[in-house]
Amino acid sequence: MGVSLLSSPEFLRLFLLSLITLCLIPQHVFASITRHYKFDIKQQNVTRLCHTKSIVTVNGQFPGPQIVAREGDRVLIKVVNHVQNNISIHWHGIRQLRSGWADGPAYVTQCPIQSGNSYVYNFTITGQRGTLFWHAHISWLRSTVYGPLIILPKRGVPYPFAKPYKEVPIIFGEWWNADPEAVISQALQTGGGPNVSDAYTFNGLPGPLYNCSAKDAFKLKVRSGKTYLLRLINAALNDELFFSIANHTLKVVEADAIYVKPFDTDTVLIAPGQTTNVLLKTKPHFPSATFFMTARPYVTGLGTFDNSTVAGILEYESTSKALHTTLPMKKLPLFKPILPALNDTSFATKFSNKLRSLANAQFPANVPQKVDRHFFFTIGLGTNPCSSNNQTCQGPNGTMFAASVNNVSFAMPTTALLQAHFSGQSNGVYSPDFPSSPIIPFNYTGTPPNDTMVGNGTKLMVLPYNTSVELVMQDTSILGAESHPLHLHGFNFFVVGQGFGNFDRNKDPANFNLVDPVERNTVGVPSGGWVAIRFVADNPGVWFMHCHLEIHTSWGLKMAWLVLDGKLPNQRLFLFSFITLCLIPQHALAGITRHYKFEIKLQNVTRLCHTKSIITVNGQFPGPRIIAREGDQLLIKVVNHVQNNISIHW
Ligand SMILES: *[C@@H]1O[C@H](CO)[C@@H](O)[C@H](O)[C@H]1NC(C)=O
Ligand SMILES: *[C@@H]1O[C@H](CO)[C@@H](O)[C@H](O)[C@H]1NC(C)=O
Ligand SMILES: *[C@@H]1O[C@H](CO)[C@@H](O)[C@H](O)[C@H]1NC(C)=O
Ligand SMILES: *[C@@H]1O[C@H](CO)[C@@H](O)[C@H](O)[C@H]1NC(C)=O
Ligand SMILES: *[C@@H]1O[C@H](CO)[C@@H](O)[C@H](O)[C@H]1NC(C)=O
Ligand SMILES: *[C@@H]1O[C@H](CO)[C@@H](O)[C@H](O)[C@H]1NC(C)=O
Ligand SMILES: *[C@@H]1O[C@H](CO)[C@@H](O)[C@H](O)[C@H]1NC(C)=O
Ligand SMILES: *[C@@H]1O[C@H](CO)[C@@H](O)[C@H](O)[C@H]1NC(C)=O
Ligand SMILES: *[C@@H]1O[C@H](CO)[C@@H](O)[C@H](O)[C@H]1NC(C)=O
Ligand SMILES: *[C@@H]1O[C@H](CO)[C@@H](O)[C@H](O)[C@H]1NC(C)=O
Ligand SMILES: *[C@@H]1O[C@H](CO)[C@@H](O)[C@H](O)[C@H]1NC(C)=O
Ligand SMILES: *[C@@H]1O[C@H](CO)[C@@H](O)[C@H](O)[C@H]1NC(C)=O
Ligand SMILES: [Cu+2]
């Protein structure tokens, strides 16, 4: 059920008005502006690998449209759902300071937007600039519903590196000939591993290394002697990716919208949910060659995976006309990069160790030096008993695959967690008792225990406002060690340490980097190892944390933090306005929710032989009666059909 305070014509009027305002008033007058976007969720037929299918898209585009804003801007995105699926959109990496209602994960911060309904995401970008992305955050719809989210520095503020000649987003994804919704639905039913994608893509294009795909190639046309800023985004569902460009070195300058100390590398490793900005310096003279850029996965798990390679083409524009006419591009020699082996954990470790915060006066690394709460979470796969008693499941040994954090496989609620918390009705929705360390310690990276079954629950870890947190995430070898890119909503965190084997609380903290650790929103828990992160819980709300390998999230590798309001008014979550509410199961509550609809309209009424048109609620004079019991929640949707402005006082 959608509740909106502005009816859509009124929204449109506001929308047009602000556009006009934008056109007339010179931008330098504003410190920051409001940017309006409209996302129509609709089906679109798309063909790749000679395979045509109808996919869920934003505005018919695949990948979806780019959102561009400046640090300090407010962004208002109206999402209208024209498809049969429920949908919600996450603005991945946006801090959402006090605006948790706009974060997007379905059943965490909002109920999904149902078919025919709409929702307005309203947030301000505070203290962030760089490359992020947006994606659907329900089921596996993000396989096609994703796009870049680019935050430019404030007007007049330069990058901490020379201004690039051009900026180019390259968003990595997967192409599935099958319907990913059917794939995950089947996997969850059989308990087995899911089918895998058929191709990887750059900006939606699989490129020439796949059958029937030569024409669908991403081409980066460049001039010699220039510097390009490539905004790399991994939006793939289930695959960490290596990326490289033949005969060119890349300079990494930013990760997850935070500047890093620049370093050169031939290959970038980027997990789903991560973004990396690199500078590409083109060769000083026309090289008489074309170069492939390629990506293929980094894989540590035991399951099957898509081991294919996507290629795009780096093509130099020839300035000489003669060259152009006598040497068509396709006749030029072609060079291909050499990527690390699919299981090259040594490269992964070296690469992640090179990432350091810029940590200068302008962009300091505010690493929490003191810690209020220490947490230790195990991260990994496990099993559930087969839910079908007339057949064996396809998971390990006839069981069903599951995944967990501290052995809690997260059970999604049917009411949004934030709504349940905010309305004081958490009873029956979640419990505030997420374990701060494993209940039964074991040798996490040694011989796996005999019992691989996981527990489950909808448990939250509650943090008072401004708690300084250290969290060690420990991979387990229960069904084979595996790298897990963990994503935290609502915060950036500092990666203060990582290692292999079991984390040693007595020895390892001595080696933590509390000076210039990389700050990000998604970090790989090393395969068979651990990672330590720190953050300050300065953002009230309910914040999802989960593996960004979508299959692991589906299996339950997710949990949520509940950060309480602080004492001051500016330490509290904003009141919700455009919130899509879920129906709360009534038996779970002492009070119930009562829904009323007030249509403000004109009505002819006669008194003393005098007929006149008056403003009424639902045509009634006096208006309708509202009845409730103590403890009930009242939801009254007021729709204004008259010319006057209106508001109602209770
Ligand atoms: C997609 O293709 C099918 C089959 O050709 C067609 O019936 C349908 O109308 C198309 N849908 C869209 C959104 O173009
Ligand atoms: C869509 O979401 C609503 C509200 O949570 C739920 O009742 C309904 O079953 C969902 N529909 C589908 C198709 O998942
Ligand atoms: C967006 O959120 C801000 C802060 O809560 C609020 O003041 C503003 O009215 C909202 N705008 C819309 C269009 O909802
Ligand atoms: C590209 O690199 C390959 C392998 O290192 C080398 O043989 C070739 O000459 C290089 N080509 C150009 C144009 O740089
Ligand atoms: C990918 O996997 C398939 C099936 O396991 C195998 O036949 C093929 O050789 C692999 N390709 C590469 C490039 O590793
Ligand atoms: C990586 O894979 C290769 C061959 O596929 C294998 O020989 C090697 O042992 C593997 N390395 C690791 C670290 O698992
Ligand atoms: C197994 O049970 C399900 C319902 O639980 C039923 O749909 C299915 O047909 C049964 N399969 C067999 C082989 O009996
Ligand atoms: C599989 O299950 C059987 C019987 O339940 C058990 O004896 C065996 O040890 C299990 N194997 C593994 C690899 O878990
Ligand atoms: C855990 O298991 C590993 C691998 O078997 C072993 O090397 C290590 O010593 C064990 N650690 C502990 C604390 O038992
Ligand atoms: C696990 O299973 C093995 C072989 O079935 C057995 O020898 C061992 O005692 C079991 N360990 C535990 C802790 O139950
Ligand atoms: C959670 O665990 C209980 C048993 O503890 C089981 O009955 C239930 O099916 C599990 N739910 C899920 C979603 O795995
Ligand atoms: C009220 O009466 C006027 C005059 O008879 C008529 O034009 C109008 O449509 C009526 N309005 C409503 C809401 O009934
Ligand atoms: Cu994972």
Image: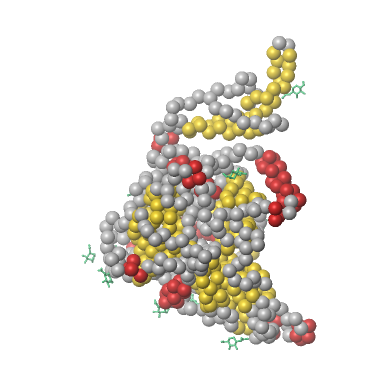
Number of numbered callouts drawn:
0
Q: Residue at x 52, y 65 (%)?
A: 361
229 horizontally vs 182: left or right: right
Q: Residue lying farthest top?
A: 608
The quadrant in which residue 119 appears is top right
> As rendered, which of 400 and 353 lies closer to the eye?
353
Q: Residue at x 55, y 27 (%)?
A: 650
Residue 157 appears anywhere in the view? yes
Place of residue 438 in the rendered image (x, y in percent of width and height, measured from the top left): 30, 57
379 horizontally vs 122: left or right: left
Q: Residue at x 34, y 66 (%)?
A: 509
Residue 298 appears anywhere in the view? no
Q: Residue at x 34, y 57 (%)?
A: 374
Place of residue 145 in the rendered image (x, y in percent of width and height, measured from the top left): 58, 57
* Residue 12 against residue 511 in the figure, above or below: above
Q: Residue lying farthest front?
A: 361
The quadrant in which residue 155 appears is bottom right
> As rendered, which of 332 and 198 lies closer to the eye?
332
* Residue 4 against residue 597 in the figure, above or below: below
Protein image colouring: secondary structure
Q: Determine the quadrant in which ligand 3 lies.
A: top right
Place of residue 524 in the rendered image (x, y in percent of width and height, measured from the top left): 44, 66
> As rendered, which of 455 and 485 lies closer to the eye?
485
In the rendered image, which quarter contains the N terminus?
Answer: top right
